[in-house]
Image: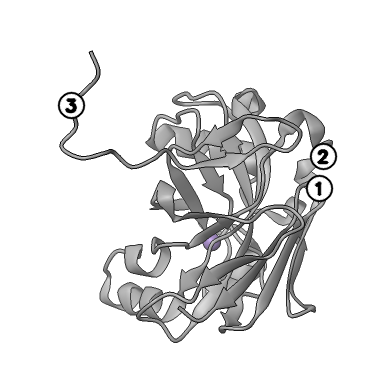
Amino acid sequence: MSTNYTFAPSATVSVPVVGASSQFPVHRIYCVGRNYEEHAKEMGHSGREAPFFFMKPADSVFYAAPGATASMPYPSLTANLHHEIELVVAIGTGGRYIAAADAHKHIYGYAVGLDMTRRDLQNDMKKAGRPWCIGKGFDHSAPLGAITPAAHVPDIDHAAIALSVNGGMRQISSIAQLIWNVAETIEQLSAAWELQPGDLIFTGTPAGVGAVVAGDVMQGDITGLAGIRVAVVAA
Ligand code: MN
C-alpha cells in the first residue's frame, strides 16, 4: 500500500550521466573546506590542517548541461557572491570506515561543480562562531555538470582544474594539488558519516576565488569531464 502523504513529497534531485540514459539520484552533498594549500593561505590559514566538512542541501544542485549556458539567479542577502571551482566525487556504493586503499570501489563517477558562496555572510558567521549554512547552503548554490563514470576517467588525480569568468582565467590548478586526495577524503568522511549511494563530495577549491556579479559568465573545466558554463543573472 502506498503512503498517504499530507502533500506531494519533493521530487528526487538527479543529474544526467555522460553516455547513459539513467539519471544519478542525489542523496547528500558533503563539502571539504580548505583542501588546496594556496587557497587555505589566501583565506588566512596555514594550509596544513586536518580536513573538515560542511554540507549543502541536495536540492541546492543546479544542473548545467554540457554545451549550454545555465542561468543562476544572483542570491539574496549578499553583495559578495564568490565562485569556487571543485572536483565533485559521486558515490555509487556506500559504506563506513572506508580505507583510502578501497575508496575507488565506492566511486561511481566525477563531475565539475561550483561551491558558490555568499562570502560576506560566511565571514560574518565565522567571526561570530556560527554555522556557515547561510553562506554555503543557499538555493542554487551547487551548480553541477553531468557525471562521468569513473571507468571513463583515466587519471582524475592528475587532472587540470580551471575556472574562467568572462573569458579571463581566475582559478587554475591540478587535482594533484589537493592536500587530502580523493581517496583520503573518502576515508575521513566515511568515519564521520555512513556514505550512501547518491552522495556527492565537493572536494575543495584551488586558489583564486573571487566575486561574480549579474551578467558574468563562469566556465568551469576539469580534464576528462563535462565542463559547465553558468551565467549569473539578476534575480
Ligand atoms: Mn568550497
Q: Position of residue 126 (x, y in %)?
A: 35, 73
> Contact, CB < 8 Å: mark 1 with mark 2?
yes
Q: Are marks 3 and 1 in contact (CB under 8 Å)?
A: no
- Residue 51 in sight in this render: no
- The secondary structure type at the circle numbered 2 is loop
Q: Amino acid at mark 1?
A: His
Q: Which residue is mark 1?
A: 158
Residue 94 falls left or right of residue 179: left
Q: Quadrant of residue 215?
A: bottom right
Q: Position of residue 235 (x, y in %)?
A: 45, 78
In primary-sequence order, the first of circles 3 and 1 is 3
Q: Is mark 1 within 8 Å of ligand 1?
A: no
Residue that appears at 77% across and 63% down: 173
Looking at the rendered image, the quarter that the N terminus falls into is top left
- Which dot marks residue 4? 3
Residue 61 is situated, as x and y percent measured from the top left of the image, at 50, 53
Q: Tell me if residue 78 can be seen.
A: yes
Numbered badge on residue 155: 2
The type of residue carrying mark 2 is Asp
For badge 3, the amino acid type reads Asn
Q: Nearer the viewer, residue 183 or 12?
A: 12
Q: Is residue 174 above or below residue 120?
A: above
Answer with left or right where residue 86 lies relative to residue 75.
right
Give the camera-side residue of 14 and 4. Answer: 4
Within 10 Å of the Cα at label 2, are there few (<14), some (14-19), or many (20+) other Cα atoms? few
Residue at 45 percent across and 52 percent down: it is 52
CB of residue at label 3: within 8 Å of ligand 1?
Answer: no
